[in-house]
Amino acid sequence: MAVKAGLPVSSCWIATEALKGLQNQAIGLAQALGVSYVVKEMKKTNLVRKLFPSGDHGLKPPWPDVLITCGRQSVPVSMAVRDASKNHTFTVHIQDPLTEPDSFDVVILPEHDKLRGENVFVTQGALTLVTEEKLAAAAEQFKPLFKGLPQPLISVLVGGKNRHQSFSVASVRDFAEKLRMAAANTGGALAVTASRRTGEKNEAVLRQELTGVPSYIWDGQGENPYFGLLALARAIVVTSDSVCMISEACSTGKPVYIYELPGLGKRHQQFCNSFIKSGRARLFTGSVEEWNCPPLEDTRKAAEFVVQRYTAKLNRCEDRNGVFFRF
């Protein structure tokens, strides 16, 4: 849901690497702010050096009123645009920039990162695209896919290995066994979508292990029914590797179960534990039940913080005659 106050801006850029996890966080914030935006994908290169004078990647005047960046690769871009615009562009960076927060107008990061400051907004999870409106639309669009499956519907969001966590064939089989237990114990069905990190071999094993279980497993063809799974589930099971998927699942306000993959690092363990302690998630051991859980509203709250900081900066730029001038 967009912040009602909105922002009095005519242009907004989103600059991130070409990674959905980064782009979706920035887009989610822009949509919550109710602003129109243009996405500019960053390549892994020296962006500041390329920024001037050639204006590579479309980064050239006129500079935007607001620039939203996400991820480390876009940090120098944010700082360079802020300088080039003579502090006119209001810069918002998502995730820990690994530099002082006063290099930006706003920094938004999850609580397991330690950076703090007056202009830092701390979230429990990642910013998301999840809104009540998107879920309602997805429910209508994807409902036919699950027609005839017994209820309740347990949606399963499958990730894969990352720098720290592994997802071996043995883990896939253990995961599948617990999913079979959940479906049998509830009398319901599974709705499964895998990610690119899952891998073809693991996905094939998962399909084989779930043979005979009432289920829908996305085959990778056509539009990913991911939002449909979020919208129509009575409960959601998600692997522990993805901060974004856990945050998206918890943004629905539905019971969320986290299946821990081997190699969960300290920071990621803290992240998962924060959702469990707040009552938004439980560990997945093969049992699923319903409980009342508060939806994660980090994106809306972060947008409200941005509006407050933008308004405060605008007010500081008021001249003695009460006439606003550009930052």
Image: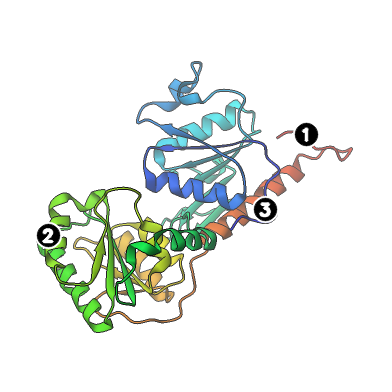
Q: CA distance from mark 2 to mark 3?
A: 50 Å
Q: What is the number of the mark on residue 205? A: 2
Q: Is residue 320 left or right of residue 66?
A: right
Label 3 environment density (alpha carbons within 10 Å; few <14, some 14–19, many ≥20): some
Tell me if residue 154 comes above or below residue 124 in the rendering. below
> Toward which corner of the image does residue 237 lie, by quadrant?
bottom left
Q: Is residue 54 visible from the viewing direction of this image? A: yes
Query: Is tag 1's residue or tag 3's residue first in the polypeptide sequence?
Result: 3
x, y percent for residue 74: 44, 36
Residue under the image location 34 percent in, 77 percent down: 152
> Toward which corner of the image does residue 60 lie, by quadrant?
top right
Residue behind mark 1: 325
Amino acid type indicated by mark 2: Val
Residue behind mark 3: 308
- Residues marked 2 and 3 touching at CB (< 8 Å): no
Q: What is the number of the mark on residue 20? A: none
321 or 25: nearer the viewer: 25
Amino acid type indicated by mark 1: Phe
Q: Quadrant of the N terminus?
A: bottom right
114 or 263: nearer the viewer: 263
In the structure shown, which secondary structural element does the residue marked by tag 3 occupy?
helix
In the structure shown, which secondary structural element does the residue marked by tag 2 occupy?
helix
Q: Is residue 118 visible from the viewing direction of this image? A: no
> Toward which corner of the image does residue 194 lie, by quadrant?
bottom left
x, y percent for residue 251: 46, 64
Tell me if residue 102 comes above or below residue 238 in the rendering. above
213 or 282: nearer the viewer: 213
